[in-house]
């Protein structure tokens, strides 16, 4: 049988890029999606070139681009076995901070973008009895003071469970990945004592490695030193 196909949004850096590298090592063919095509091209070359990795420019806030992303994956590789809705970004806490425009972009990317990924990929995942993963956060399990980002991740946590309930009889497994503090390009001031991208990538691969009858629904992953 041909190697399985793994699509990742937000694949150009951070958790997405780390997961792509681990998935490539595990034998997956990759579909790498993000707005930054130049970074994707470099990563695709690193992971085996056009025979093993496809770079697709995609703004997840546009459904037609997500449809085109899935179509490109199927045209290139013939199937879609894993979809990781990982695209997202944050904002400073405080309801008088940041601009309304940044808020709008964040909500559209983190919430609507994830929903669009689910909608665009369900038919292919149903055919493969595949696996859907979404990047939420510890901030999607508890409210943070003044954090609209936290509210978006609460939405993603709920979305993952809503998708699981909707898809449980299709054979599609659904996993919410909920990192605590991770040292990624997400932060302007890099944290200390935090998780690394690789830690989250290994958690993703653990969820994927389970037998078909096992669905790891939620993975909350904190650094040892993080108290809450």
Image (cartoon, rainbow, N blue to C red):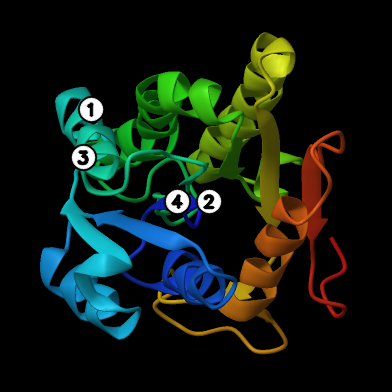
Is the residue under label 3 in contact with that under label 4 (CB below 8 Å)?
no
Q: Which residue is mark 4?
A: 5
- State the residue lying farthest toward the left: 38
Cα–Cα gap, marks 3 and 2: 17 Å
Cα–Cα gap, marks 4 and 2: 12 Å
Q: Front-most of 102 and 181? A: 181
Is the residue under label 2 in contact with that under label 1 (CB below 8 Å)?
no
Q: Is residue 141 left or right of residue 200?
A: right
**In the image, which disc is placed on residue 67?**
1
Q: Dot 2, crowdedness within 10 Å: few (<14), some or many (≥20)? A: few
Q: Dot 4, crowdedness within 10 Å: few (<14), some or many (≥20)? A: many
Cα–Cα gap, marks 4 and 1: 16 Å
Residue 164: tell me if it is visible.
Answer: yes
For the point 66% across and 24% down, which residue is it?
158
Q: Dot 3, crowdedness within 10 Å: few (<14), some or many (≥20)? A: few
Q: Which residue is mark 2?
A: 1
Cα–Cα gap, marks 4 and 3: 12 Å
Q: Quadrant of residue 44?
A: bottom left
Among the two numbered marks 3 and 2 on one chain, the one whose residue lies closer to the N terminus: 2
Q: Secondary structure at mark 4?
A: strand
Percent position of residue 111, x then y: 44, 30
Q: Secondary structure at mark 3?
A: helix
Q: Dot 1, crowdedness within 10 Å: few (<14), some or many (≥20)? A: some
Is the residue under label 1 in contact with that under label 4 (CB below 8 Å)?
no
Q: In this rendering, which labeled residue sits more in front, label 4 or label 2?
A: 2
Among the two numbered marks 1 and 2 on one chain, the one whose residue lies closer to the N terminus: 2
Among the two numbered marks 4 and 3 on one chain, the one whose residue lies closer to the N terminus: 4
Q: Which residue is mark 3?
A: 75
Cα–Cα gap, marks 3 and 1: 12 Å
Q: In this rendering, which labeled residue sits more in front, label 3 or label 1?
A: 3
Among the two numbered marks 3 and 1 on one chain, the one whose residue lies closer to the N terminus: 1
């Amino acid at each position: 049988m041909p190697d399985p196909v793994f699509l990742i949004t937000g694949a150009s850096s951070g958790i997405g890029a780390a997961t792509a590298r681990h998935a490539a090592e595990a034998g997956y063919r990759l579909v790498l999606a993000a707005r930054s095509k130049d970074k994707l091209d470099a990563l695709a070359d690193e992971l085996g070139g056009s025979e093993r990795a496809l770079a697709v420019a995609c703004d997840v806030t546009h459904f037609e681009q997500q449809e085109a992303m899935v179509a490109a994956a199927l045209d290139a590789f013939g199937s879609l076995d894993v979809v990781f809705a990982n695209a997202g970004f944050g904002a400073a806490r405080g309801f008088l901070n940041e601009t309304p425009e940044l808020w709008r972009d964040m909500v559209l990317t983190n919430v609507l973008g994830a929903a669009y990924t689910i909608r665009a990929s369900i038919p292919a995942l149903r055919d493969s009895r595949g696996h859907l993963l979404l990047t939420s956060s510890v901030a999607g399990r508890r409210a943070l003071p003044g954090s609209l980002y936290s509210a978006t991740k609460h939405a993603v946590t709920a979305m993952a469970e809503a998708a699981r309930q909707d898809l449980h009889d299709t054979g599609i497994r659904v996993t919410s990945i909920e990192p605590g503090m991770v040292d990624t390009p997400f932060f302007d001031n890099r944290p200390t004592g935090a998780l690394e991208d690789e830690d989250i990538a290994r958690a993703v691969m653990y969820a994927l490695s389970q037998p078909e009858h096992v669905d790891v629904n939620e993975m909350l992953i904190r650094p040892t030193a993080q108290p809450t």
